[in-house]
Amino acid sequence: MPKKYWLMKTEPGCFSIDDLKKAKVEPWDGVRNYQARNFMRDEMSVGDGVLIYHSNSDPLGVAGMGRVASKAYPDHTAFDKDSRHYDPKSTLENPRWIMVDVEFKTKFKNFVLLADIRKEAKLKELRILQKANRLSITPVDKKHFDLIVKMGS
DNA sequence: GCCAACGTTGGC
DNA sequence: GCCAACGTTGGC
């Protein structure tokens, strides 16, 4: 299967690129959106490239790069009553939510600001720039992925 | 199956 | 903190 590329959002106040660097590999739990889930279930494979995007923070933008390190498997936080991601409709027999492991690759030398991504004409088709795109996982074209990595290096 | 109400996301 | 946009829920 050809390698694919993704952008995954995280709130750094909750889990940042530095946390990922420290953890090396992290289960990407808490995704509670069907479109994002289906990307993980149907399209992701081990080795895919991941842009790590910091949302809801200052600065906003892409902080680094990782890779998909596992296939999708049940998100156990959905079973945990004490988790903020608890979903009573997800059961062990029939898990509704899944996650993949994400492995740290690099923290960008130059944080790639959302404002600079907006200014770059070649990136105008990027999903996160489209109006009101709230998807926490979006596919990224290889050429866009490579350009953002270049901007960050 | 419609749709109003509600909760969440996330940039500003 | 605001609020627009969107997804989900649930009554009908």
Image (cartoon, coloured by chain):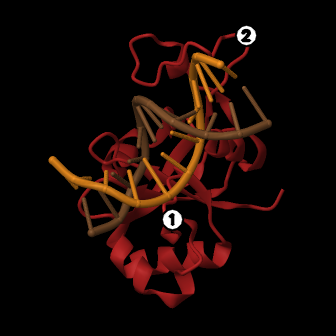
Chain colours: A red, B brown, C orange
Secondary structure at numbered mark 2: loop
Q: Label 1 belongs to which residue?
A: A128
Q: CA distance from mark 1 to mark 2?
A: 34 Å
Mark nearer the viewer, 1 or 2 = 1
* Kind of residue sitting beneath label 2: Glu
In the rendered image, residue A14, in percent from the top left (x then y), is placed at: 31, 39
Which quadrant would the N terminus of chain A be assigned to in this image?
bottom right
Chain letter belonging to callout 1: A
In the rendered image, residue A13, in percent from the top left (x then y), is placed at: 26, 44
Left or right side of B6 for A137: right
Left or right side of A58 for A42: right
Secondary structure at numbered mark 1: helix
Q: Along the line of sight, which residue is nearer the eye, A36 or A112?
A: A36
Residue A93 is marked as 2
In the rendered image, residue A117, in percent from the top left (x then y), is placed at: 43, 78
Q: Along the line of sight, which residue is nearer the eye, A122 or A112?
A: A122
